[in-house]
Image: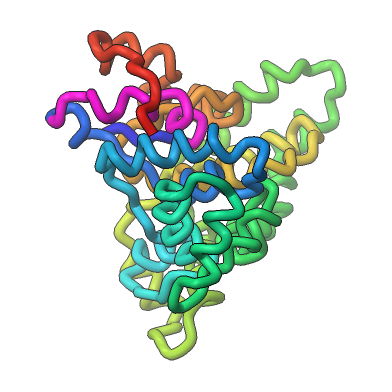
C-alpha cells in the first residue's frame, strides 16, 4: 500500500484516473492531505486547486476521512466523533469538485443543509487549525529527564561535535522500542478528545494496537533532534509529522517533503519514497494525460 502525502497528491492527481485499477487499489490518502490541498483557497488559484480535487474525486482514490484525533483514539480502541474541520473538509471537497468558481462554491456551501463553513477553509491559509492541535500532545511530553542522560549531556556539552555525529548518536540512543511514557502521551491526546468514553489510562495503554507507532517514533525523533541540534521545530512540522498517523505499519509514504525524508532515512528508510521514485518504479507506464476537469 502507498500513502499519498499532499505534495504527492498534487504531483500524481492527473495520472490517477488512468492508473490501472489494480494499482489504484494500492493507493490512498487522507483528510489531512485533502485539507492541505484546499485550505486557503483563493479565487486566483481556484481553477488549479479544483483540477487537483476533481481529478482525485473522479479517480475514486480511497481517502481516510478520519481526523488525526480519531486515528489516535482508534489506535487505543476508542471512538470519537469527527471534528468540525474534518467534516467541513470532506463536504467542501465534493462541492469544489463540482463548482466553476470560488464564489459559486461558497454560495453552494451556504445553501447546503446544514451549511458548510467554507470560510473556515478559506481562512486557514494552508495551516492546521486549532482543531488539529490536540493531536500534537505527543510533542509536549516531558522529555527533559531523557535529555539529562549522560550520552546526551556529553553531546550537548561538546560544541565541536558536528550535526551528522549528533544525529548518528541520536539514532543509536533513541530509536528503540516505544516506552510507556510515549504511549501515555498518546493516551493523553486521546483523553483530551473524549467525554463519556472509557478514560482509564491503564485501560487505554493495554488497548493500544501499535498502529501509530511510526507517528510516535517520528515525534520522538523530531523532538530529540531539535534538542540535540538546538534548532526549534518549524511551523509546518506538525502537519508534516501528522501524516505518519495514516501510514500504519505496512504502507509506504510517497512524499518529497524534506522532513519526512529525513525522519524516514533515520528510522525506516524503506517506508518513504520520493515522488520521482514512485513514478519510475510503481507507475512507470502511466502517462500524464492532463486534467479533464
> Percent position (x, y) of residue 273?
41, 21
In terms of depth relative to the viewer, which is nearer, 186 or 168?
186
Magenta residues: mostly which secondary structure? helix
Kindly tell me whether residue 253 is visible in this rendering: yes
Residue at 54 percent across and 60 percent down: it is 181
In terms of depth relative to the viewer, which is nearer, 62 or 109?
109
Instruction: Name the image quarter holding residue 207.
Output: bottom left
264 magenta-colored: no
> Percent position (x, y) of residue 226?
73, 37
Query: Residue farthest to the bottom?
Result: 196
- Residue 289 against residue 125 in the figure, above or below: above
Q: Is residue 171 left or right of residue 19?
A: right
Q: Is residue 150 left or right of residue 192?
A: right
> Percent position (x, y) of residue 167?
64, 24
> Percent position (x, y) of residue 185?
55, 63
The residue stretch that appears in magenta:
6-21
In terms of depth relative to the viewer, which is nearer, 142 or 96?
96
Residue at 60 percent across and 22 percent down: it is 168
Q: Is residue 9 left or right of residue 23?
A: right
Amino acid at each position: 500500500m502507498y500513502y499519498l502525502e499532499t505534495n504527492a497528491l498534487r504531483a500524481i492527481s492527473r495520472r490517477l484516473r488512468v492508473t490501472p485499477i489494480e494499482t489504484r487499489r494500492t493507493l490512498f490518502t487522507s483528510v489531512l492531505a485533502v485539507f492541505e490541498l484546499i485550505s486557503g483557497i483563493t479565487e486566483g488559484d481556484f481553477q488549479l486547486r479544483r483540477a487537483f480535487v476533481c481529478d482525485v474525486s473522479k479517480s475514486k482514490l480511497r481517502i481516510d476521512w478520519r481526523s488525526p484525533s480519531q486515528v489516535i483514539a482508534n489506535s487505543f480502541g476508542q471512538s470519537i466523533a469527527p471534528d468540525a474541520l474534518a467534516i467541513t473538509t470532506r463536504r467542501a471537497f465534493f462541492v469544489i469538485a463540482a463548482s466553476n468558481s470560488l464564489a459559486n462554491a461558497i454560495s453552494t456551501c451556504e445553501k447546503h443543509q446544514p451549511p458548510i463553513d467554507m470560510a473556515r477553509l478559506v481562512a486557514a491559509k494552508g495551516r492546521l487549525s486549532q482543531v488539529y492541535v490536540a493531536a500534537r500532545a505527543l510533542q509536549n511530553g516531558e522529555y527533559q529527564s531523557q535529555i539529562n542522560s549522560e550520552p546526551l549531556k556529553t553531546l550537548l556539552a561538546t560544541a565541536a561535535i558536528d550535526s551528522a555525529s549528533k544525529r548518528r548518536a541520536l539514532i543509536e540512543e533513541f530509536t528503540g522500542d516505544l516506552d510507556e511514557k510515549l504511549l501515555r502521551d498518546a493516551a493523553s491526546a486521546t483523553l483530551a478528545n473524549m467525554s463519556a468514553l472509557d478514560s482509564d489510562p491503564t485501560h487505554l495503554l493495554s488497548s493500544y494496537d501499535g498502529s501509530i507507532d511510526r507517528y510516535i517514533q517520528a515525534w520522538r525523533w523530531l523532538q530529540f533532534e531539535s534538542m540535540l541540534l538546538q534548532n526549534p521545530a518549524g511551523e509546518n512540522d506538525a502537519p508534516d509529522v501528522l501524516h505518519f498517523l495514516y501510514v500504519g505499519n505496512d504502507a509506504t509514504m510517497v512524499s518529497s517533503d524534506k522532513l519526512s525524508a529525513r525522519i524516514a532515512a533515520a528510522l525506516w528508510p524503506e517506508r518513504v519514497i520520493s515522488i520521482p521514485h514512485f513514478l519510475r518504479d510503481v507507475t512507470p507506464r502511466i502517462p500524464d494525460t492532463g486534467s479533464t476537469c
